[in-house]
Image (cartoon, rainbow, N blue to C red):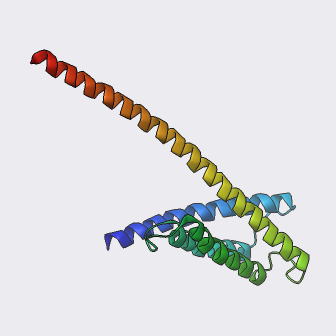
């Protein structure tokens, strides 16, 4: 039961952050488009995407539900349903002229670019962080070896 409540707390925190970021990004976009307010249906669509999207992230990128899965499969488990979620919201809330094929191609292109950009950014970050920690681990091992030899030398002095 404790694990369940920890998961709910983790989900609520992630959902709040995602919703805040979505509202800020949408507000900036609307300002550039000459709007001075955000319609309530737009907020509702952002809330739906946030709540379900955060659930998909929890499903795909944590070990809470799916214990062992390759990272590439996790990406697919997240990317495909999230694209479907966004497309359904785009259609239902009329984010753009949904009858236009070119608008759907632009929508899919933007999704692909943002998804790939985010994925590459995370990979670069994790790679850099991994190298940093590998370096720190190497320093720790050298220091530990030096300390170990000092202790051996001290023991020999007392014998």
Which percent across, then down, holds residue 125?
Answer: 60, 48
* 109 in relation to 148, above or below: below
76 or 101: nearer the viewer: 76
Is residue 44 something that shows in the picture?
A: no
155 or 105: nearer the viewer: 155
Q: Residue furthest left?
A: 159
Which percent across, then down, holds residue 87?
Answer: 74, 78
Q: Is residue 111 left or right of residue 125?
A: right
Q: Is residue 52 left or right of residue 6?
A: right
Q: Going 32% across and 69% down the picture, which residue do you hit?
A: 2
Q: Residue furthest top?
A: 157
Q: Quadrant of the N terminus?
A: bottom left
* 18 in relation to 153, above or below: below
Which percent across, then down, holds residue 32?
Answer: 84, 58
Asked where in the image residue 140 lies, by quadrant, the reply is top left
How many numbered marks have been drawn onto this rendered protein structure? 0
Asked where in the image residue 45 lies, by quadrant, the reply is bottom right
Q: Is residue 31 left or right of residue 19?
A: right
Is residue 128 something that shows in the picture?
A: yes
Which percent across, then down, holds residue 35?
Answer: 84, 64
Asked where in the image residue 111 lies, by quadrant, the reply is bottom right
Q: Going 32% across and 29% down the picture, which residue do you hit?
A: 145
131 or 22: nearer the viewer: 131
């Amino acid at each position: 039961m404790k694990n369940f409540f920890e998961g709910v707390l983790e989900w609520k925190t992630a959902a709040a952050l995602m919703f805040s970021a979505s509202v800020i990004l949408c507000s900036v976009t609307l300002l550039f488009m000459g709007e001075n307010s955000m319609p309530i249906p737009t907020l509702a669509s952002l809330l739906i995407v946030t709540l379900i999207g955060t659930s998909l992230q929890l499903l795909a990128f944590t070990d809470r539900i799916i214990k062992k899965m390759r990272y590439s499969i996790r990406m697919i488990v997240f990317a495909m349903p999230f694209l479907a979620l966004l497309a359904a919201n785009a259609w239902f809330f009329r984010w753009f002229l949904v009858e236009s094929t070119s608008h759907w191609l632009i929508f899919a292109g933007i999704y692909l670019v943002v998804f790939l950009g985010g994925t590459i950014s995370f990979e670069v970050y994790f790679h850099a962080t991994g190298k940093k920690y590998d370096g720190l681990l190497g320093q720790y091992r050298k220091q530990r070896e030096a300390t170990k030899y000092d202790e051996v030398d001290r023991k020999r002095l007392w014998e």
